[in-house]
Amino acid sequence: MRSSLLPTASWAILVCIFTATLALAEPLRVATFCSNITPPLGQPMISCDRLGMVEQPLLAKGIVLQAGGKRYVLCALDWCELNNGSHEAYRNKIAAAAGTTAAHVALQTVHQHTAPVVDREAQKILAAAGAGELQLDPKAFEVIGDRLAEAVQESLGRLEPFDHIGTGQAKVDRVAATRRPVDASGKIRVRYSACKDAAIRALPEGKIDPYLKTITLARGEKPLVRLHYYATHPQSFYGDGRASSDVAGDAREALQCKEGVFQIYFDGCGGDITMGKYNDGSRACRVALARRLLAGMEAAVAATTFTPAREIHWRTYPLRLPRRSDAGFGLEECLALAKNSRAGPVQRVDSGAMRVVFHRRNGQPIELSALEIGNVDILHLPGEPMIEFQLFAQRLKPAAFVAVAGYGDCGPGYICPAKAFREGGYEPTASNVKPESEGLLKQALIALLNGQ
């Protein structure tokens, strides 16, 4: 009896091993997609000025990854912000198009200021107050989102195997600098993205992450797509009715044209970082900044080394950030401001309607995610995180290649270390969350990078 059962049991074991080997042997696949997300002429941009000229089309660029029967999407939008329910709505559209769930979609903005700030719930509040034109038209929002979803769906027919992941980094020369330089008296001086004050420009570069990190997905020696991560506000100008992908887009598209390889750019934790030290707002500065950013990208590509890419791990974390209710941030005060026809349009949108929407989320968590491929970790964070969070994440896992993308759901506004509220400066004045958010976000980073 026992001898007659042995062959059957052995065969069953062999079948299990063979099946597991087939599952492991299923190749990782990737497809790229690109969609024009430029609003129609006449629609509002970040400062509520009307779009009058398209200098460059605003693009959504991303990848679909397929592994183990599941799909994951990474996407960067050439928009300034996508907030609250609008962010969730576009994630849902992308997920449906990719045949996956919203939990497997990381959607970030590049944060150019020559682009719109979009919050459809805020638009409804403003429309009820007779000022709906201060936000992107709902029909335009749907059309742009549907076009993006079509691009994602179409890319599925081009999924192709990749078997190597490359990592490279390089210092970027004279682009990023702190927005919080300290003068000789110990006072924080705000160094905006375009700074015409030579004395403020002359202050030290300050704490930044000087490295641009590049991740390449390749089949053999053939690169299929490159993902670039660098932390700074990417705008060199804004407020004149132009749509432009600005410095980041100039460098990104120049490298794509030169290499013939699809390029995507993600902004890191650049909440307190700008180009203001090296930018007086002139066209010449913009050209020089783009050239130096491109040189950093090329140096990171040249420094790239490859390792086999065998499997993908995707983790999510529900982050709940406490809402501010101090003066200027209370729900009723913000609602009154949104309805106040005598207030400035930017105040009604940013300090009024969008803060009302964030209040009304009633503690709904913001979903963070992390992608791990071999020794590479990519973190996807919300809001405008200050550089401390990027440096903290890298310290958590020093032996790994940790890349960070900020500017996911921008409902929280700036996410600052608690000490920034004590120090002052610009960022805490535009944060919708309390100082204790620092500990909560760092707890999330620990969990995501430790695989919890």
Image (cartoon, rainbow, N blue to C red):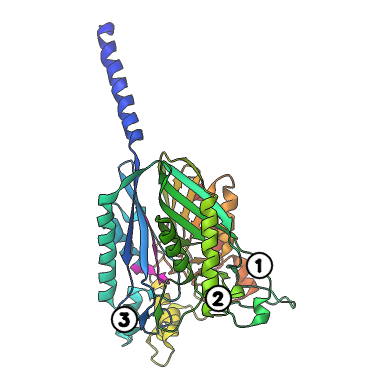
Q: Nearer the viewer, mark 1 or mark 2?
A: 2
Kindly indicate the quadrant of the structure image that contains residue 129. Answer: bottom left
Number of residues whose C-alpha sits closer than 10 Å to that of mark 3, classed few (under 14), some (14–19) or many (20 or more): some
Kindly identify the amino acid type of the residue bearing the numbered disc 1: Gly
Write down the region rendered in magenta. Answer: 74-86
Q: At 33% from the left edge and 86% from the top edge, which residue is drawn?
A: 131
Q: At 42% from the left edge and 58% from the top edge, which residue is drawn?
A: 263
Q: Nearer the viewer, mark 3 or mark 2?
A: 2
- Residue furthest right as drawn: 184
Residue carrying label 2: 285
Kindly indicate the quadrant of the structure image that contains residue 341. Answer: bottom left
Q: Is residue 180 visible?
A: yes
In depth, the one of 404 and 443 nearer the eye is 404
Would residue 273 be counted in the magenta stretch? no
> Which label is found at residue 206?
1
Q: Is residue 402 visible?
A: no
Residue carrying label 3: 41
Where 104 sits versus 90, above or below? above
Q: Nearer the viewer, mark 1 or mark 3?
A: 3
What's the distance in space between the residues labelled 3 and 2, CA to CA? 27 Å
Number of residues whose C-alpha sits closer than 10 Å to that of mark 2, classed few (under 14), some (14–19) or many (20 or more): some
Residue 407: image x %, image y %? 45, 65
Mark count = 3
Kindly identify the amino acid type of the residue bearing the numbered disc 2: Cys
Residue 49: image x %, image y %? 40, 85
